[in-house]
Amino acid sequence: MQTVTQASQAPASKRDVYLQICQQLDALLTGETDIIANAANTAALLANSLPDINWAGFYFLRGEELVLGPFQGKPACVRIALGKGVCGKAAETAETIVVRDVSQFPGHIACDPASQSEIVAPLVSWGKVLGVLDIDSASVGRFDDEDREGVESVIAVFLEALAGSDWPDLLDESRDLEDA
Ligand code: SME
């Protein structure tokens, strides 16, 4: 009996946590194509499901700037120039960036001084960068390659829900991958 109890209390692996998030997100977003509503629910689900994080949210690309989208956490910087900070760098390169210690990332933009580590993944669809998903933690070294995989799979579910919709004006101001 004791063994069963212990087994049932074993913490879920990161992989399992992201798998569950993706399943819940798929159920939440299926049938809805509004990018703001879906981004809001995605941020809320991440904030309520991922341990040890203090901010989760979106920035969408408008011309040469990222503009704050739906998020959970403390109020954040509204505009980030392409190439600036972790978010601007991820949007510019179209690559996920895992920052173990934000104090070691040149140009890191501190919206919440509590944030110590960060992962930023680009939203890439139809050969364009639409924006980024940013997640912060108050612990150094919170994110690793498993989070990279997990966050990218969350983005895949988010983008899948928008597929086939009339893409919003946001896309017109997104960034062609050829420029990355
Ligand atoms: N730290 C980010 C800015 C956004 S906030 O963390 C919400 C950056 O360096 O781009």
Image (spheres, rainbow, N blue to C red):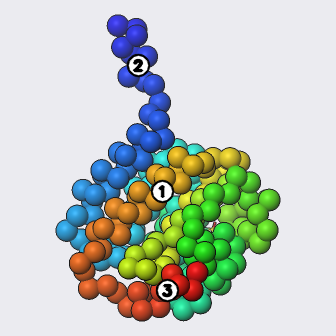
Task: Tell me how far mark 2 sits from mark 1, CA to CA.
Answer: 27 Å
Give the foreground label among 3 and 1: 3
Q: Is residue 54 visible?
A: yes
Disc 2 beta carbon < 8 A from ligand 1?
no
* Crowd around label 1: few <14 · some 14–19 · many ≥20 (10 Å): many
Lower sequence index among marks 2 and 1? 2
Image-based side of 53 in relation to 104, left or right: left
Kindly identify the amino acid type of the residue bearing the numbered disc 2. Answer: Ala
Q: Secondary structure at mark 3?
A: strand
Q: Which quadrant: the N terminus?
A: top left
Residue 168 percent coordinates (x, y)? 34, 87
Q: Which of the two discs, 3 and 1, labels the residue nearer the N terminus?
A: 1
Give above or below for 105 relative to 3. Answer: below
Frontmost of labels 2 and 3 is 3
Query: What numbered label is drawn on residue 176?
Result: 3
Label 2 belongs to which residue? 7
- Asked which quadrant contains residue 74, the reply is bottom right
Residue type at the position of mark 3:
Asp
The residue at the far top in this view is 1
For disc 1, the marked residue is 151
Residue 102 spot, x, y in % from top left: 74, 59
Q: Is residue 105 left or right of residue 23?
A: right
Q: Residues within 10 Å of mark 3 (few under 14, many from 20)?
A: some
Residue 91: assigned label: none
Q: Position of residue 9 (x, y in %)?
A: 43, 24
Amino acid type indicated by mark 1: Val
